[in-house]
């Protein structure tokens, strides 16, 4: 997805948010905001991928803050809150007439654990308060039947995760995918370095992803979504040979929508107008959409 003018204030809002998470030093906060605004004025290009611009801007903010993980406390809390909801979600899945579709919905609800942006959460505790409402909303757009057919035809899938906390719900989804298609080889991909509220290897193991997936690997470097210039050679090869790609969250859509990788399945909450418009979906819905 190309960067939209609406992405700029959203990006700046998030940089302000992470700056405030990292330091109370107002002089440093001012410096970070000033320098990232200057940088954005130089690199903004409507022909460039939105995630690429975001990666450059956030990398600069982290560097100025001298903080490798400004979101670490929020990420820890997100994992804690998500873990506390697991039993409730497991019951919903078990009592459902379609366990796979219900696990998809719950996994997408976890996608709201995104901080400092429009449509995300103000804090991890919001998920407990909003879960029932979001569950009752259901899937505003569903290609679940197409997804099921693709699962049956596939031997290997790549599953790109998104946020901390959310990854606990992804574990339940992966578990149901395995039940639906037991012979699938599932490789889960997490971030290679801390970036925003995204899950890393540490979070994957905390969520017991290793107990349901066949393999866990990483994106290899600091990037919002994915930076194809620095991904490990193994992941590059997997992208060529996998039968199906499953992507959680908006940043992965921003990146993969610029490629020809198909079939690909996006599971996300449409939190902003540029994403919703690009996907031809309403804003603020839970969606699973297949491109093939």
Image (cartoon, rainbow, N blue to C red):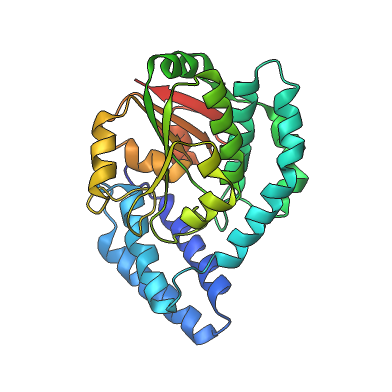
The percent position of residue 67, horizontal first and vertical second, equals 45, 75
Q: Dividing the picture into quarters, in which one does residue 133 lie?
A: top right
Q: Position of residue 56 (x, y in %)?
A: 32, 62
Q: How many marks?
A: 0
Is residue 170 rendered to the left or right of residue 276? Answer: right
Q: Is 194 placed above or below 149 here?
A: below
Vertical order, 211 against 139 (above or below): below
Q: Residue at x 44, y 27 (%)?
A: 280
Q: Is residue 94 in view?
A: yes
In terms of depth relative to the viewer, which is nearer, 264 or 239?
239
Residue at image point 71% right, 41% down? 86
If the image is split into quadrants, where does the N terminus sit? top left
Q: Nearer the viewer, residue 93 or 112?
A: 93
Above or below, 100 relative to 52: above
User: What is the x, y in percent for residue 251?
Assistant: 42, 45
Q: Is residue 86 left or right of residue 5?
A: right
Which image quarter is the C terminus in? Answer: top left
Instruction: Tell which of 49 and 182 is nearer to you.
Output: 182
Residue 286 in view in this figure:
no
Which one is in front, 110 or 176?
A: 176
Question: Which residue appears at 47% of the width and 43% of the height?
Answer: 161
Q: Position of residue 192 (x, y in %)?
A: 38, 56
At x 40% / y 38%, what residue is drawn? 253
């Amino acid at each position: 997805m190309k960067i939209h003018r609406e992405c700029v204030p959203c990006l700046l809002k998030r940089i302000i948010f992470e700056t405030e998470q990292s330091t109370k030093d107002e002089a440093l906060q001012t410096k970070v905001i000033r320098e990232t605004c200057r940088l954005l004025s130089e690199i903004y290009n409507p022909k460039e991928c939105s995630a690429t611009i975001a990666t450059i801007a956030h990398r600069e903010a982290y560097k100025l803050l001298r903080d490798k993980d400004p979101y670490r406390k929020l990420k820890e809390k997100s994992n804690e809150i998500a873990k506390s909801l697991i039993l409730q979600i497991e019951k919903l899945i078990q009592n459902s007439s379609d366990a796979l579709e219900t696990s998809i919905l719950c996994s997408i609800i976890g996608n709201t654990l995104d901080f400092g942006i429009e449509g995300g959460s103000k804090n991890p505790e919001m998920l407990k308060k909003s879960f029932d409402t979001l569950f009752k909303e259901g899937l505003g757009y569903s290609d679940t039947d197409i997804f099921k057919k693709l699962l049956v035809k596939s031997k290997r899938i790549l599953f790109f995760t998104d946020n901390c906390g959310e990854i606990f719900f992804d574990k339940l989804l992966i578990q149901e995918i395995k039940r639906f298609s037991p012979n699938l080889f599932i490789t889960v991909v997490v971030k290679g370095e801390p970036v925003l509220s995204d899950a890393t290897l540490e979070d994957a193991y905390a969520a017991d992803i290793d107990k349901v997936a066949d393999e866990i690997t990483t994106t290899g470097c600091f990037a919002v979504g994915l930076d194809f210039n620095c991904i490990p050679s193994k992941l590059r090869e997997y992208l060529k040979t996998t039968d199906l790609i499953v992507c959680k969250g908006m940043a992965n859509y921003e990146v993969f929508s610029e490629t020809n990788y198909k079939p690909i399945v996006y599971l996300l909450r449409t939190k902003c107008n540029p994403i919703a418009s690009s996907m031809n979906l309403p804003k603020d819905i839970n969606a699973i959409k297949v491109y093939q």
